[in-house]
Image (cartoon, grey):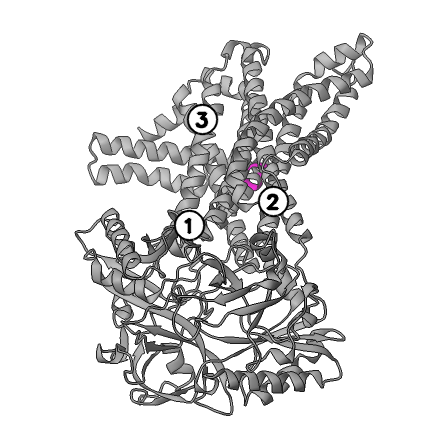
Amino acid sequence: MWRHYICKTGGQCKQASPFFSILLAILPAIARTIELTHEGHAMLTILADVAQDIRYVSRTLRRSPGFAAAIIVTLALGVGANTAVFSVVNAVLLRPLPYPNPDRIVMLMNTWRGRVSPSSGVSPPKIILWRQSTTAFTDIATYTFGRSLNLTNPRDPHVIGVARVSIDFFRLFGARVAQGRAFSAAEDRPGGPHVAVISDRFWRNQLGQSSRAIGQAVSLDSDLFTVIGVLDSDFDGRALSPSLADGPDIWLPLQMDPDTSSDLNVYFAAARLREEVSFELARTETAHAADLVRRTFPGVMPVDNGLTVERLQAVFVRDVRPALLLLWAAVTVVLLIACANTVNLLLVRASVREREMAIRVATGASGGRIVRQLLTESVALAMAGGGAGLVVGAIGTRVLLSIQAWNLPSFGPEGSRVAMDVHVLAFTLITSLGIGVAFGVVPALRAMRVDVDDQLKTGSRGRSDTSAHSVRSGVVVVEVALALMLLVGAALLIRSFVAVRRVEPGFDTHHVLTMQTALIGRHFASGRAVSGLVTDALHRLEALPDVEVAASTLTGVPLDAGAALNVSIVGRPRDDEYYALGWNVVSPEYFDALKIPLVRGRFFSNRDGERGAPVALVNEAMARRYWSDGDPLRDALVIAPRIGGDIEETVPRHIIGVVGDVRHHALRQDLGVYLTWIVRTRGEPHRIADVIQNEIRTASGGLPPVRVRSMDQVSAASTGQSQHQMWVTTTFSAVAMLLAAVGLYGVMSYSVEQRRIEIGIRLALGADVKQVRRMILAQGMKLTGLGIAGGIAAALGLTRTLAGFLFGVQEHDPLVFVGVPLLLCAVAVAAMWIPARSASSVDPMTA
C-alpha cells in the first residue's frame, strides 16, 4: 500500500537516500505490528508523504544552491536581528522578576499634576502615613542605598555598597538568610544596636567563607557592626539598587525616626498587595493617604503633588522600555522586508517551474500534493534561515550588550539575564515556521492555477505571469515604503544626536580630571572636618607642577549628576510655590577649574567660608526666569525651607553673582555623600592621575578616590546612550534599505528577462538604446515612487512615537522628509542600473 501510493504520486523510490529507504521500509512493519486503526494508517501515510517531500526538496535545492543561499541569508538577517532584540526584550520586559509573586509587588511613587514622577524616592512622612492609613498592603518595606568605606583592613580601605533596610525588606523580596538571622523589630528602631547582615559575596571575598562569621565585627567608617546573618547566594540586590552597580555587600537596619518631618525624597518604599486587593483599590487608598499627608504636613505635600503606586517591574523598566520597543519595531520592519524578498524569490522560482508543475499534474499529482510539496520547500528554507538566524542573533545579542546602549537593569545573580533560553528558541522556531508557511502559500496557490495545456504545448507565461508580476511589484512597493519609514526614523535620531552634540555644556571639558571620595562616617560629621580636608587636599594638588587649578564640589560634576532642593526667594509672598531647583556646594576654585564664565557680580572667595556671611551664585537661566525685570544681586535665597534636619537653612544667602549656564543631565537619589575633586591639568589628565590620587589619599587619611575620569569622558558618556541607539537604529535602517534595493533589483532583472523578446523587437524596429534604458528605469521608478509615497504617510505617524527620543529637531523635519526620499531614489536607480544596461544590450536576432 505504502509503496504503491508513493510511486503513484510521482516519487522515485529507487533513488531514495539510505535514511529514507530505511524509514519507508519500516513504516509498514510498524503498522502491522501495532495493528493500526484507520486514523493510525492516515497518520503514517502523512509521515511517509512528508518524508518523501523532504527527500524531494533536498534534491531540488541541491540543484539550485544560489536560490537556497539567497533565501537563507536574507532570512538569517531578518530573523537574527529579531532574535537578538527579543533576547533583550524577553529578559527585561517579559520575564518575571526573581522575587516571590513579583506581579503583586508595588512601589510608592510621587506624582506631580497627575503624572508619576521619574524619581522613585519618597520622604519619611509620606511612607509613615501611607503605612498607617492603608489596608491594601502587607510586608511594607523601606530601604535606601549608599556607599561606605570598609575599614576592616585599615591597610586596604575600599568602597563597598551598603544598604539600609526595614525588617520587612527581606521577607518582601524573598531574601533568605543562609546563616544566622535577619533583623528584629528592636534592632530597626532609632538608636538600635549596630548589627549587619552581609551578602554571600562579602562572606566569601572579605571573610574567607569563615564558619565563625556570625558574631564577627565589621568596621564601617570606624563604627563596629556585628554580623548577625549571611544572605543566601541566590539573592542579588542589584536590580533594587540603581546607585550601586554591584549591589550592596552589607545590609544595615534602617532605624528611621517615626517622628521625622523631613521632606528629603531619598527613601524607597515597596509593598505586596494583599490577595483580595486589586491594583486599582491600592491606588485609591494611596491617593487618600496623600490627602492625609497634605493635611498633616502642608510643606511636605504641596497641592500639585500626590502619591500613587506602580508595579515593581514597570518602575524598573520604565527608562528602557520605550527604547527597546522602538528597537523591536525597527527589527520587525527589517524582518518584513526580508520576508518580502523571500516571497519575490519564491514567486520567481514558481514561474520558472510552471512547466515542471504542469508535467507533474499531467502525470497524476493532485493539486494538494503540489501545494504540500511547495510548502515543505518554503518551510525547509525558512527553518534553515531560522537556524542561521540563531547564530546571527547570538552575535547580535553580544553586540547589543557590549555597547550597553540601553542601560539595561540587572535582575538576579546572572546580571541582565539576557540569554538564548527556551523562550528565545521558541520565538525563533515559531517565527521561522510562520514565515515558511505564510510566505509559501502564495507561490503554492499560484502553482495550483497553472494552465497544463499551455505549458505542455508552448511553455508560455500568459495571464498568470502577469498577475505574478503584479504581486511581485506590489511587494517591492511595500519594501520601499517600510525602508523609507525606518530611514526617516534613523535620520531623525541622527539629527537629534547632532543637535545634542552641538549644545554648549557651558564649560571647558579639556584637560580636566575628576574623582570622588566618600564622606560617610563620624570623621566627616561636621562641616569643619570637611573644610579641613578640602583645604589640605587642594593645597597639595595645586603644589603639583602639572596642576593648573584644583577644586571640589559635593554634588558631582556637570553632565553627570546633580541634586535638587526647594528654594524660596526672600521677599516673595509666602503663598508663592517653593522652587525645586538644582543646587551645588563648591569651592571658590570650581569656576576657574571648569572655566565657567562670570556674567555679573563676583565669584566666591576664601572670605566666604564658615565665618563669612552666607552667599550664593545663580546661573543665567534662573536669573532670566525669576528676575526678568529685576536685579538678582539685590535679593537673597533660603535653601531647603521646611525640609528639616541639617539641610534646612534659616539664614538667607545673599546673591553675589550670576554665572553662565552649565548642563546637568541627571538627578540621583543617593544617601552617600561624595566629595568630588576637579583638577585642571597642564597636559593629558590621566598622565598624573596616580599622583593626584595619592595626594588626596594622604590628605584624607587614606580614603580611596573612586570614579577617576576625565571631563571629556564624562561628556562622551552623557551622550553615549543616544549615540549607541542612533547607530543601532541606523544599522538596521541600512540593512532595510539594502534589502529593499535587492528586492527592486530582483524584480527589475526578472522583468527584463521576461520582456527580452519585446525589447528585442523594439530594438529591431529602431528603438534607441537610451530609450530602452529609460523605459526600464521608468518602470522601476514608478514602483519606487509608490513606495516612497506610502512610506512618507507611514513615517508621519511614526514620528509621533519618536517625539520622546528627539532633541533640537522637529518631528516633521523638512530636511529629513526631503533628503531620505532622495537618498532612496538614488539607491533605487543604482539597483536598477544593471537590469537597465542588460535590457539595452539585448541582441534582436537572439531575442
Q: Decide: marks 3, 2 in contact (CB < 8 A)?
A: no
What is the crowding at mark 3: few (fewer than 14 residues within 10 Å), some, or many (at least 20)?
some
Q: How many marks?
A: 3
Residue 104 appears in the figure: no
**Which residue occupies the extreme left position in the image?**
276
Q: Identity of the amino acid at label 2? A: Leu
Real-space Cα separation, disc 2 to disc 1, in angstroms: 29 Å
Which is nearer the N-term, disc 3 or disc 2? 3
The residue at which mark 2 appears reads as: 493
Q: Could you say whether the residue bearing mark 1 is in a helix, strand or loop? A: helix
Distance from the alpha carbon under mark 3 to that under mark 2: 38 Å
Point out residue 645 in the picture as x, y percentages from the top left corner. 39, 74
**Residue at image location 70% in from the left, 31% down from the top:** 822
Regarding residue 818, the answer to whether it shows in the image is: yes
* In the image: residue 612, left or right of residue 269: right
Residue at horizontal 58%, vertical 43%? 732
**How many C-alpha atoms fall within 10 Å of the one at disc 2: few (<14), some, or many (≥20)?**
many
Instruction: Check disc 3 and give the amino acid type.
Output: Val
For this view, does 429 lie left or right of residue 398?
left
Q: Nearer the viewer, residue 667 or 98?
A: 667
Q: Which residue is mark 1?
A: 424
Depth-wise, is mark 2 or mark 1 nearer the camera? 2
Residue extent of the magenta highlight: 69-73
Q: Is residue 197 above or below residue 376?
A: below
Location of mark 3 (residue):
441
